[in-house]
Image (cartoon, grey):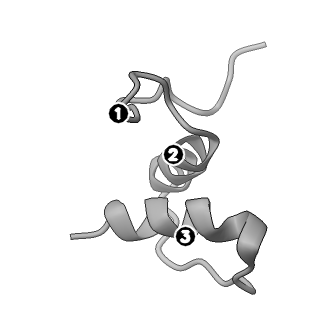
Amino acid sequence: MASAVPSPQSASSEGQTTGSRLVMDALVHHGVERVFCVPGESFLAVLDSLHDGTS
């Protein structure tokens, strides 16, 4: 079964892709324009990736 998520194009400073970056890449791949959430401590890395992915 093929994955719907493309292979990640960016990596962390250690050369490994983070889970939060994979979430961001999947959202971009699927054309998501808005994300709603209740921010919390365990979700901050994803929020950082969303912020870093915007221009």
The first of marks 1 and 2 along the sequence is 1
Q: Secondary structure at mark 1?
A: loop
Q: Is residue 54 left or right of residue 48?
A: left
Q: CA distance from mark 2 to mark 3?
A: 10 Å
The first of marks 3 and 1 along the sequence is 1
Q: Quadrant of residue 35?
A: bottom right
Residue at position x 51%, y 53% in the image: 24
Q: CA distance from mark 3 to mark 1?
A: 18 Å
- Return the residue nearer the eye: 24 or 15: 15
The three-letter amino acid code for the residue at tag 1 is: Ser
Q: CA distance from mark 1 to mark 2?
A: 12 Å
The residue mark sitting in front, 3 or 1, is 1
Q: Is residue 24 left or right of residue 55?
A: right
Which residue is label 1 attached to? 13
The three-letter amino acid code for the residue at tag 3 is: Leu
The residue mark sitting in front, 1 or 2, is 1
- The label shown at residue 21 is 2
Which residue is label 3 attached to? 47
The first of marks 2 and 3 along the sequence is 2
Residue at position x 69%, y 83% in the image: 39
Q: Secondary structure at mark 3?
A: helix
Residue at position x 53%, y 79% in the image: 34
The three-letter amino acid code for the residue at tag 2 is: Arg
Q: Is residue 28 left or right of residue 46?
A: left
For mark 1, does the 10 Å Cα neighbourhood hold few (<14), some (14 to 19), or many (20 or more) residues? Answer: few
- Identify the image quadrant of the N terminus: top right
Residues at marks 2 and 3 touching, judged by CB atoms closer than 8 Å: no
